[in-house]
Image (cartoon, helix red, strand yellow):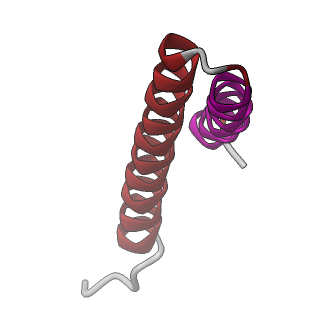
């Protein structure tokens, strides 16, 4: 798991906690912050996925048999 995926997981957990706390206490601002944090977590995960895909593409080109 790379940095982006870790950040994504943390943001999602923090976001779910804030959202739940806001819901229980009736604090709509905290609840909204939780939803924003969860969205940030999803973005970090997508960035991590894109980085992984890029690394895989580079590795496949490097490891491809030479045609010469």
Q: Is residue 1 left or right of residue 68?
A: right
Q: Give the x, y percent position of residue 1.
A: 72, 49
Q: Is residue 3 left or right of residue 48?
A: right
Taking the view exactly as shown, the residue that stands out farthest to the left is 68
Q: Residue at x 40, y 85 (%)?
A: 65
Q: Residue at x 37, y 52 (%)?
A: 50
- Residue 64 position (above or below residue 31): below
Q: Residue at x 59, y 15 (%)?
A: 27
The quadrant in which residue 20 appears is: top right
The quadrant in which residue 61 appears is: bottom left
- Residue 56 position (above or below residue 41): below
Taking the view exactly as shown, the residue that stands out farthest to the front is 26
Q: Is residue 49 left or right of residue 21?
A: left
Q: Nearer the viewer, residue 21 or 54?
A: 21
The quadrant in which residue 10 appears is: top right
Which segment is the magenta one?
A: 4-24
How many numbered callouts?
A: 0
Q: Is residue 15 magenta?
A: yes
Q: Residue at x 46, y 44 (%)?
A: 42
Q: Give the x, y percent position of residue 7.
A: 64, 30
């Amino acid at each position: 798991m790379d940095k982006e995926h870790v950040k994504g997981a943390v943001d999602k957990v923090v976001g779910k906690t804030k959202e739940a706390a806001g819901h229980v206490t009736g604090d709509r601002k905290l609840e909204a912050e939780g939803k924003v944090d969860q969205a940030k977590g999803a973005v970090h995960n997508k960035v991590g996925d894109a980085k992984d895909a890029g690394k895989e593409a580079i590795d496949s080109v490097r490891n491809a048999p030479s045609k010469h």
